[in-house]
Structure formats: C-alpha cells, structure tokens
Amino acid sequence: MKLVQWYWNGVFGELYGSAVDSRISRDFLEVPLWLKDGPVPSTVSETIFRSDRLKTMRMRLSAAYKGVNALLMKEGAEDFRSGQAFDDAIFFGESVDIHHIFPKQWCANAGIKADIFDSIINTTPLSYKTNRIIGGVAPSAYLQRLQTGTPDTPAINADRLDQILASHLIDPALIRADSFAAFMADRQSRLLALIEKAMGKAAYTGDVKEEGVDDEQDEDGAEAEMTIAAD
C-alpha cells in the first residue's frame, strides 16, 4: 500500500519530469526506510496536487495525463460501445486510445476554445471503433446512435449505457443534455476525488498561482483559459 501511494504521488506530483537523478537518489534512500516504519519520503510528504491542474493538463505524454487514464481503467472504466473493461487484451486488441467526450468538431462549432475542450477533463479511454461511431456530433446524438445500434454494433440499453458512462466518472444526465460547462465542472471534481484517493491526501484548492510552472499550450500556442465559459 505504501509503495502504491509513493508511486501515485510521484506521478501526480510530476516529480520525475526534471532533476531525475536527485529524485531517484532520494527515493532510493527514503522509501525503504518508510517501508520499515521510518519517516515519510519527500516524494510523498512534499507533493501537492493542485485542483486547477486538471484544466491545464493536455500533454498526452506527460506522466500525470497518463496517470489519470490509467486510474480510470484500473477503477473499471468500460468502453462506450462494447461495455468491456480495459484489460490488457482489450487495450491492445481494440486499439484503445484517449479520445474526447465532447468531440472536437462539436466544441469548435459551439465556440469553445481548444485550450478548454482539449484538457484531460474532456477525454477518456475508448476503443478505435467506438471513437469512429462518436464522430464529431453532440454527445446526445452519439449516445442515441449507440443505443440504436448499427449494422456492425449491437444496440445498448439506455440504463446500461448510463452505467458505462458512470464508470468513466461521467454524469450521464449532463452529457445527454449536451451541458458542456456543467459536465466539465462535475467531472473535474470527480477526477480530483480519484486522484486524492490514489495519493492519500487532499488536493490544493486555493487560488494562489503556482510559481515557475508554465501552462501546457495547445498546438496554436494560445494562452490557456483558466475558467470555463458558460454554454
């Protein structure tokens, strides 16, 4: 259990992104002592996760970004189309990747900035086939498409689909209503609770900005919006 907590603190504290040698050296000395009931290692005691970090997390290759989606799959997230959990066989066999919940095209048509809709709050692990069904339409439209079924995909009962959505920490009522702003706020709080559980500590929810940390930019390099505009 301690090793698991140490691991997730390292991931969400993003401590191995720089000064790796010094971090490894400290962990090499501190973690074994902690496992023998010694002092808590600095990787755990000094790590702080900021709640607003989820709004600026867009880099797919970052440890924290991958960590959120790994936690979702670990907690039992199921594919929207098949209802299958993402075990090793499904993950590789179905070409599972991270995809948007509110599709890019829909968000762009609604005037929502990429810096907002590209955050990890609006993404989740899905199979390649499922993402093709989702396309660029509103969630209400692609959910109806999943319920109705296609020649290649069996229909899904609405209640079962709601269970699948909930496994991704998505409030079914909010995306069925295409309520982007409400969805973003609600899912941020749900993802934050998931991260806090993994780290074994509460996140920082104050409004003091962190010094020396650049916001992750989208491909256009635009400055990120730290608040979500209303629908």
Image (cartoon, helix red, strand yellow):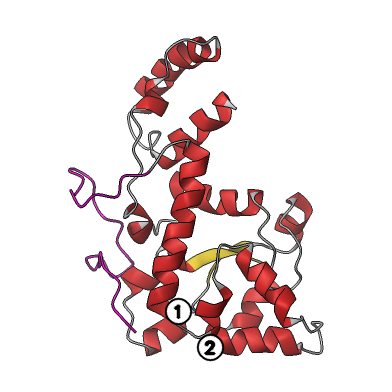
Disc 1 is placed on an element classified as: helix
Q: Is residue 102 left or right of residue 181?
A: right
Q: Is residue 218 magenta?
A: yes
Question: Which residue is rendered at x = 42% and y = 61% of the image?
Answer: 188
The image quarter containing residue 131 is: bottom right
Where residue 217 sits in the image (x, y, percent)? 29, 61
Q: Is residue 61 visible?
A: no
The numbered dot on residue 137 is 2
Where residue 116 sits, quadrant-wise, is bottom left
Which numbered dot is residue 104?
1
Q: Quadrant of the C terminus?
A: bottom left
Type of amino acid at the residue the image marks with label 1: Lys
Q: Amino acid at mark 2?
A: Val
Rendered location of residue 67, percent (x, y):
51, 47
Q: Residue 138 location, x and y as percent?
A: 52, 87
Residue 112 sits in quarter: bottom left
Residue at point 77%, 89% (across, down): 150
Main SS of the magenta part reads loop
Question: Residue at 25% of width from left, 68% of height from top?
Answer: 225
Specify the segment rendered in magenta: 203-231
Q: Residues within 10 Å of mark 2 (few under 14, many from 20)?
A: some
Closer to the chain start, of discs 1 and 2, is 1
| 143 sits left or right of 33 in the view | right
Cα distance in 3D space between marks 1 and 2: 9 Å
SS at circle 2: loop
**Residue 83 appears in the rendering:** yes
For disc 1, the neighbor class at 10 Å (few under 14, some 14 to 19, many from 20) is: many
Q: Is residue 30 magenta?
A: no
